[in-house]
Image (cartoon, rainbow, N blue to C red):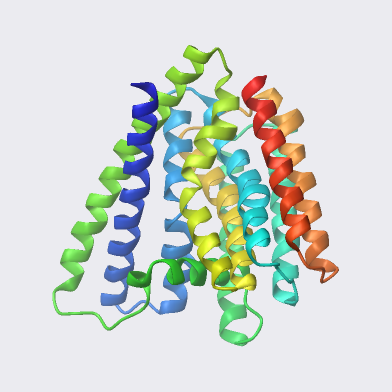
Amino acid sequence: MTVAGLLLGLALLVGGAELLVRGAVRAAECFGVSPLLIGLTLVGFGTSTPELVASVQAALIGSPGIAVGNIVGSNLANMLLILGASAVITPLAVPSRALKRDGAFVLGATLLFVGVGLFGKLDRPVGVLFAVALVGYLIYAYRQERRSAEEHTAAFGRAEAIRHTHPALRPRPPRRLGWLVALVVAAAGLGLVIVGGRVLVESAVVLARHLGMSEAAIGLTIVAVGTSTPELVTALVAAFRKQADVALGNVLGSNIYNLLGIGAVTALIAPTPVPPAIARVDAPLMLGVTVLLVLFAWTSMRVGRREGAVLLALYAGYTGYQLAA
């Protein structure tokens, strides 16, 4: 039943997030919100709902290993598993100066998160700091996209990657009375996400106890990969379509939303400590992988198939270590 609960919770999370984002996007279009703003906020952050709800639910029931492990593990999965798989399919070039700036922002956000883990906890002051940083980034991204049609930000790349994967999210003229139906769809999606997050987290806790594993190990691997499934699908579709810049932007944008957005909401709703093992090992590892990714961006290097295979091998080794520990 534990494995079945995990699968059921994941299905409810992913399906509910899909309905939530579609309904919210349609409602925003009916109310005249610009497509750019919708993409940077509702599309970009809304598709991180599975990670968000899982972390908040875990923090609420007193499982910091799953709450924080899900954030760190999702970012590691983004950079090693998702980016690695994308590069194996289609080598990724990093020519955009905007992506380089976003890489520096991801690095700064990661350093901030690592510092919180080593010297503090995810409490409400930290949540406010993370929220202010995320809003600042979104303002920068919005201004950058309005100013330049050539150098896109990671937030824009993430929204475009998602829209390529889900054609129903592409902008279209609103229909009469469509806003009411859209809000109902969004509310139904939110309900499914909340229930799915509860089922997923509770099943993960039971599984950890049954297998004699730490909750942190479950959060860093099984929960993180499960909640990152939408990002994986989005990145693979972009890679198959040879949209390398969009694939990379999806990963960078997702990491920013995970660290600052999910970190902020979790800290504000359910303040939680950072488990010592994650603070000492997994978070610094996330920082090291981020530095590697930023170096690729700043040197205009390609993330080729060999590099992608190395990233996948690193993730396989990391996952094996966590599950065996």
Question: What residue do we see at 26% from left, 57% from top?
Answer: 186
Q: Is residue 1 above or below residue 302?
A: above
Relative horizontal placement of residue 232, taking residue 252 as reference (left or right): left
Q: Which quadrant holds residue 164?
A: bottom left
Outermost residue, left side: 177
Image location of residue 307, percent across then percent down: 77, 56
Residue 297 vs residue 164, the one in the foreground: 164
Residue 79 vs residue 255, the one in the foreground: 79
Q: Do we see residue 106 in this rendering? A: yes
Image location of residue 115, percent across then percent down: 74, 39
Question: What residue do we see at 55% from left, 72% from top?
Answer: 156
Image location of residue 211, percent across then percent down: 52, 14
Q: Is residue 77 above or below residue 278?
A: below
Q: Which quadrant holds residue 200?
A: top left
Residue 318 vs residue 42, the one in the foreground: 318
Q: How many marks?
A: 0
Question: What residue do we see at 78% from left, 68% from top?
Answer: 302
Q: Is residue 282 above or below residue 310?
A: above
Image location of residue 301, percent across then percent down: 82, 68
Q: Do we see residue 155 in this rendering? A: no
Q: Which quadrant holds residue 6?
A: top left
Quarter of the image with the C terminus in it: top right
Question: What residue do we see at 55% from left, 61% from top?
Answer: 235
Quarter of the image with the N terminus in it: top left
